[in-house]
């Protein structure tokens, strides 16, 4: 799935072989999340979708709007099926909660109790906890922040190694991915910068395949190449 910042919806592809985008086919292009706000709840209006991810075993979908500093949460009737019933649950504003004025990418802890955002103008990672797992309509608390300014002046996304010992931040200034290693799993206060990998012009959203041997990424909207890139690594997450 890919979020479409122009049409405010999803582009969905089916893969013949898991994780292999070379054998993919377009299933549908749904400009639904703008419409969700119009026909289900005016508060759910979703224009200019940027960072977007599924969570809670595919039963929820989250999207960040760079223009209004909000993350919005939607529930799906059928997991990972954006054609099923979609309900707008609510939103969290990161400007009022933490003073983060340009959230653009995020990632969740596997248990849904914590998520991290990157702020493209603040050059930082901010950590938030939720009182109810996977639910940003519950109490959301900013716990701590971590500056990446020394490595990247325009961070765009964050993704974690599944065991919480590493996280990765992409950026359009350095046109690559910075790796940070945590001495305590999932604790960004214990993180240190360990490497930088150039991956091409202006990477935007990033994710790893299931075993960490492939980094999958897109480029930002100024690139206009409408492609998904895959980079192979001989050593997982390295």
Image (spheres, rainbow, N blue to C red):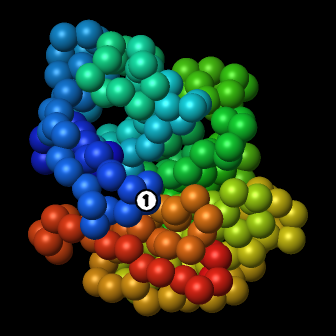
User: Which quadrant would residue 132 be assigned to in this image?
Assistant: top right
Pick whichever, 153 or 191, lies toward us.
191
Quarter of image, res 174? bottom left
Q: Is residue 204 visible?
A: no
The one of 95 and 201 positioned closer to us in this rendering: 201
Q: Is residue 167 left or right of residue 52?
A: right
Residue 24, horizontal then vertical, whole percent: 25, 56
Residue sitting at 52 percent across and 64 percent down? 208
Residue placed under numbered mark 1 in the picture: 19
As drawn, is 147 to the left or to the right of 16? right
In the picture shown, does residue 219 fall above or below 173?
above
In the image, what residue occupies the spot 64% across and 76% down?
236
The correct choice, above or below, for 27 with respect to 20 in the image is above
Question: Residue at horizontal 72%, vertical 37%?
Answer: 111
Image coordinates for residue 26, horizontal then vertical, percent: 17, 47
Q: Residue at x 41, y 31 (%)?
A: 80
In the rendered image, is residue 42 in sight?
yes
Pointer 1 local density, CA inside 10 Å: few below 14, some 14–19, many at least 20: some
Residue 163 position (above or below residue 180): above
Which residue is outermost to the front? Answer: 16
Q: Please tell me which residue lies in front, 138 or 17.
A: 17
Q: Secondary structure at mark 1?
A: loop
The location of residue 82, given as percent across then percent down, is: 31, 27
Placement of the C terminus among the 4 image quadrants: bottom right
Extreme residue in the top direction: 40
In the displayed structure, 124 sits above or below 138; it is below
Residue 16: image location, x then y, percent = 33, 52
């Amino acid at each position: 799935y890919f979020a479409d910042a122009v049409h405010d919806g999803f582009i969905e592809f089916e893969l013949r072989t898991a994780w292999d985008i070379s054998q993919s086919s377009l299933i549908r292009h749904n400009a639904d999340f703008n419409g969700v706000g119009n026909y289900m709840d005016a508060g759910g209006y979703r224009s200019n979708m940027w960072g977007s991810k599924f969570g809670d075993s595919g039963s929820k979908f989250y999207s960040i709007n760079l223009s209004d500093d909000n993350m919005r949460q939607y529930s799906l009737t059928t997991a990972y099926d954006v054609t099923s019933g979609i309900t707008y649950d609510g939103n969290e504003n990161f400007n009022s909660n933490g003073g983060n004025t340009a959230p653009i990418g995020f990632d969740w802890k596997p248990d849904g109790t914590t998520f991290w955002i990157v702020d493209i103008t603040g050059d930082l990672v901010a950590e938030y906890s939720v009182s109810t797992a996977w639910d940003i309509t519950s109490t959301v608390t900013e716990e701590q922040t971590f500056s990446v300014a020394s490595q990247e002046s325009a961070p765009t996304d964050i993704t974690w190694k599944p065991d919480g010992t590493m996280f990765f931040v992409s950026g359009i200034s350095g046109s690559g991915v910075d790796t940070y290693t945590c001495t305590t799993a999932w604790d960004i206060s214990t993180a240190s910068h360990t490497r930088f990998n150039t991956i091409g012009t202006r990477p935007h959203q990033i994710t790893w395949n299931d075993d960490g041997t492939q980094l999958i990424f897109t480029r930002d909207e100024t690139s206009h190449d409408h492609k998904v890139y895959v980079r192979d690594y001989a050593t997982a997450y390295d």
